[in-house]
Image: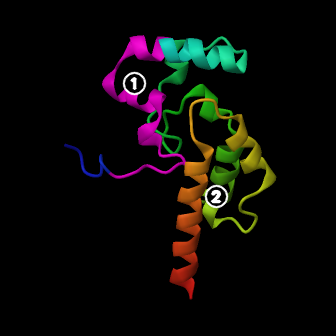
Amino acid sequence: MKTGENQPMIAYCGLNCRECEAFKATERGDIEALTELARRWGEHDNTNYRPMDLECEGCKSDRVNEYCRRCSVRECGVTHGFESCAECEEYPCDELRREWKSWHDADWSSAKAVLDHMRANEHRARV
């Protein structure tokens, strides 16, 4: 077992990358699951994904799926050097809210709860 493999891998938006279907399929090397995911996500996004487009090791890695690579929330977090949106003065911004509402396979309310918790812990650490 690799160190930290049971630890959450929180994306800028609050999702746990380890719970993402693309992450899990990539980790297993499951091309059939990636093929099905490419079909489903492609229908939702009106995009022609290939299975390899969805290979991902988390949004903070060098191997990011096509959907997350295009994510404006991820781009903002990278640009500002944040670990998550919880660090931002503007949290939760309109862009993050739009991203949450666009999800088809993920629970944005859980992602928001994660970021709210992180923000509260960060605030307590500063006080």
For badge 1, the amino acid type reads Ala
Nearer to the camera, 55 or 90: 90
For the residue carrying disc 1, how many other residues have a C-alpha within 10 Å: few (<14), some (14-19), or many (20+)?
many
For the residue labelled by badge 2, is the local secondary structure a helix, a strand or a loop?
helix
Residue 15 lies in the magenta-colored region: yes
Is residue 98 in view from this perspective? yes
Q: Which residues are magenta?
A: 7-35
Left or right for 25, reference 85? left
Q: Relative to residue 17, is residue 63 depicted above or below?
A: above
Q: What's the CA distance linking mark 1 and mark 2?
A: 26 Å
> In the rendered view of the protein, which quadrant contains the N terminus?
top left
Residue 102, given in percent of the width and then of the height, sits at 71, 35
For the residue labelled by badge 1, is the local secondary structure a helix, a strand or a loop?
helix
Q: Residue tagged by mark 1?
A: 25
Q: Residue tagged by mark 2?
A: 85
Residue 6, given in percent of the width and then of the height, sits at 30, 48
Is residue 83 in view from this perspective? no
For badge 2, the amino acid type reads Cys
> In the rendered view of the protein, which quadrant contains the C terminus?
bottom right
For the residue carrying disc 2, how many other residues have a C-alpha within 10 Å: few (<14), some (14-19), or many (20+)?
many
The residue at 58%/16% (across/down) is 40
Left or right for 78, reference 124? right
The residue at 57%/41% (across/down) is 107
Residue 35, given in percent of the width and then of the height, sits at 48, 11
The residue at 40%/13% (across/down) is 31
Residue 18 lies in the magenta-colored region: yes
Q: Residue furthest left?
A: 1
Q: Relative to residue 95, is residue 118 depicted above or below?
A: below
